[in-house]
Amino acid sequence: MSYPTYPSGYWYPNDFAEPVTWLPVVFAYSIMISGAATLFLAYIAYVFTRFKEVIPHMLVVGLSLFLVILLGPLADLRAPDNAWRMMVSPRILPTDAEPGFSVMAFQGSVAWPIVILISIVFTLLYFSYPLYLRYKETGNLLYRILSLGISSEKSYASLEKPLKILALVGSIILVTWLVYPSTLFMQTYNFVWINSMLLPIIFFSENLLLGISIIVLLLWITRTFRLYPKTIRSLSIIIAIASASAAVALILQTGIWFLRFEGSPYYSSLTHLYGLITIAVTLYIMALVLSLLSTRHISLSIITSILGIAGVVISRWNFVVKAQEISRTGLGVIEVSIPGIEYLMIIGLFSLGVFLIIVLSSIFPLNIWMRRGESL
């Protein structure tokens, strides 16, 4: 099969008018989805009664990041004055004028509110009795209100079944977020995205890796990671599995590109992504090795978490931003100059999530298992 060749690659006129379909702030949006992964892990841990020492941390981090997650796509809107229409009148099912199922409308107007409602109810019930104990210690009326009237061990124990039902339902819905927004990108006409069939697997692995890495880093920041050596070792194993999965998925995807496009004029455009892919895979391999070593030396888990976070950030920037520098035809690459305001919006979205983590951490007692004297 012969391919047309062009001196510098072929571009549609619209590519020059607006070369980036999704603004770079959506990169921050794709990173904040780690909040969904953290909530998912918290619910799974509660259902199977595992990692109880860090479930409070997972709930606080996951809820904080997930609460502000929709600010990412809203910041990308070209007509922000119409943003409210997406929530009150979403087009989810296909119509004659607009065929196809809208993944964005479903996730934003259906899945997100349901998960938020479940997560708020679950978090309040989970912390109810510990908050009552804090009220007894401090006399702060806020803790009394947030305890929802749960004032005894017996009434707190009766919440176990409802909490497991909420956790099970929430974890099922959150699975859709673990592969999102890769499913959204694959519906967008971009040469890289429509030819990246392993993108959902890459995002799934990276979201889990990022979620666990943030929790381990938080335990280090709060200087409590040495109190849970068994849990840290178990989390390190999960980091190792997620790192290996992400690295293998990236290598396989580049292999598929090579087998499919090598020898054609399209392949040179795909090599535009190889530099950051190489860096990400290297970081994942380093995280894999160190996470295995950290099962014996838990202090290495700090470095492992940082490597995991760095790898995901680099890989996500590659697939969300640099992938859009490749022409829709796949026959050219143009470097896009990103305005400074875009970086400020990215920092602002991250900062809001961190701010909520600090606020919720000051309200909810993260060390409830230690306070109640239960064994680790």
Image (cartoon, rainbow, N blue to C red):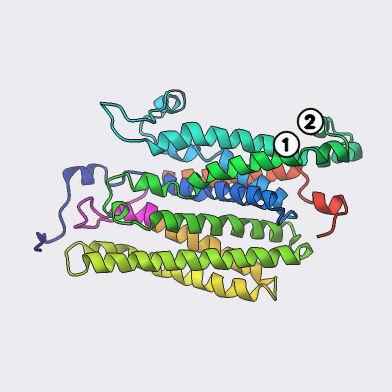
Q: In front: 49, or 203?
A: 49
| Stretch of the chain drawn in magenta | 319-340
* Amino acid carrying mark 2 in the image: Leu
What secondary structure is marked by label 1? helix
Q: Horizontally, is 168 left or right of 14 in the view?
A: right
Whether residue 154 appears in this view of the structure is yes
Q: Horizontally, is 374 left or right of 355 in the view?
A: right
Which mark is on residue 343? none
Main secondary structure type of the part rendered in magenta: loop
Percent across and percent down for residue 190 are: 28, 49
Q: In front: 112, or 138?
A: 112
Which mark is on residue 124? 1
Q: Please identify the quarter of the rendering in which residue 98 is found.
A: top left
Q: Please identify the quarter of the rendering in which residue 158 is found.
A: top right
Look at the image and tell me in which quarter the C terminus lies. Answer: bottom right
Percent across and percent down for residue 23 are: 37, 44
Tell me which label, 1 or 2, sits earlier in the chain.
Answer: 1
Q: Is residue 371 above or below residue 216?
A: above
Q: Horizontally, is 94 left or right of 38 in the view?
A: left
Q: How many marks?
A: 2
Q: CA distance from mark 1 to mark 2?
A: 8 Å
Tell whether label 2 touches label 1 (CB within 8 Å): yes
* Amino acid carrying mark 1 in the image: Leu
Q: Residue at x 81, y 52 (%)?
A: 369
Percent across and percent down for residue 34 are: 54, 50
Q: Residues within 10 Å of mark 1 (few under 14, many from 20)?
A: some
Q: Which residue is mark 2?
A: 148
Residue 349 among magenta residues: no
Q: Horizontally, is 267 left or right of 208 in the view?
A: left
Q: Residue at x 57, y 68 (%)?
A: 240
